[in-house]
Image: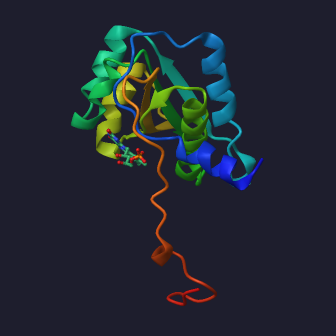
Amino acid sequence: MEPKAILDFICRRRSVRRYQKKAIPEEILEVLMKAAMAAPSGNNVQPWEFVIIRDPKTKEALSRVHPWVYMAAEAPAAIVVLGDKSSEWWEDDCAAATENLLLAAANLGLGAVWCGIKENQAAAVRKILGIPARLEVLCIVPIGYPAESPPPHTKYRKDKVHRDTYGQKF
Ligand SMILES: Cc1cc2nc3c(=O)[nH]c(=O)nc-3n(C[C@H](O)[C@H](O)[C@H](O)COP(=O)(O)O)c2cc1C
């Protein structure tokens, strides 16, 4: 792939918070799971698990877990990313999996948003979904065909890049 095509692929991912009422086909959900589970993981432990939620009542309950996950109610699906805390890298690994999922979604014409779940918000998610104690909750990803189209962007800033030692510029 050309460098520009790679950058286009990555920058196509934006946070999308409004969705069409169109279901996501099962085979597309499977592609998203395959993309997520292609992520790197510490010691190759692959501590991630995922819950795909389409049930309206469950999505509604999740949308109330904190004020910034409201879009889970209207999204045709929400994906909850879980990590096995017996791996010391579970957060890093699940974050990598989430980004893979988001990149795949954007390039399949879907819109999604990473909604972080703090430790003090996780109990509510655990209760709603019946998550076993060995698993932690990283985030909720509401997802659907987009009803808004934020333009691609990179947020590149040259001043954030250092050469050879901190503070040394190009
Ligand atoms: C760890 C993390 C937690 C986030 N939590 C939320 C959230 O709860 N609700 C939300 O609407 N967006 C959330 N976002 C999305 C950010 O607001 C978004 O990535 C940022 O504004 C940049 O916009 P972009 O994703 O379109 O590039 C979160 C992103 C990350 C990485």
Q: Residue 30 occupies which quadrant of the picture?
A: top right
- Between 60 and 108, the one lying in front of the other is 108
- Which of the pair 123/57 is nearer the observer? 57
Which residue is pictured at 47% across the width and 33% down the height?
133
Query: Compared to 68, does 128 lie above or below?
Result: above
Location of residue 92 with respect to 51 vertically, above or below: below
Labels in figure, total: 0
Query: In the rendered view, how is the structure colored?
Result: rainbow
Image-quadrant location for residue 31: top right
Of all residues, the one furthest to the right in this rendering is 1
For the C terminus, the quadrant is bottom right
Q: In this rendering, would 99 be left or right of 33?
A: left
Residue 74 figure quarter: top left
Residue 26 in percent (x, y) is at 61, 11
Coordinates of residue 34 in the picture (x, y in percent): 69, 29
Q: Residue furthest left?
A: 67
Of the four image quadrants, the one with ligand 1 is top left
* Residue 134 visible, this orientation: no
On the rendered structure, is 80 left or right of 65?
right
**Horizontal and vertical percent position of residue 71:** 31, 26
Viewer can see residue 71: yes
| Camera-nearest residue between 4 and 161 | 4
Q: Is residue 31 above or below residue 106?
A: above
168 displayed left or right of 15 = right
Residue 102 percent coordinates (x, y): 54, 37
Residue sitting at x 67%, y 34%: 35
Which residue is rendered at x = 39% and y = 33% of the image? Answer: 16
Residue toward you, 101 or 121: 101
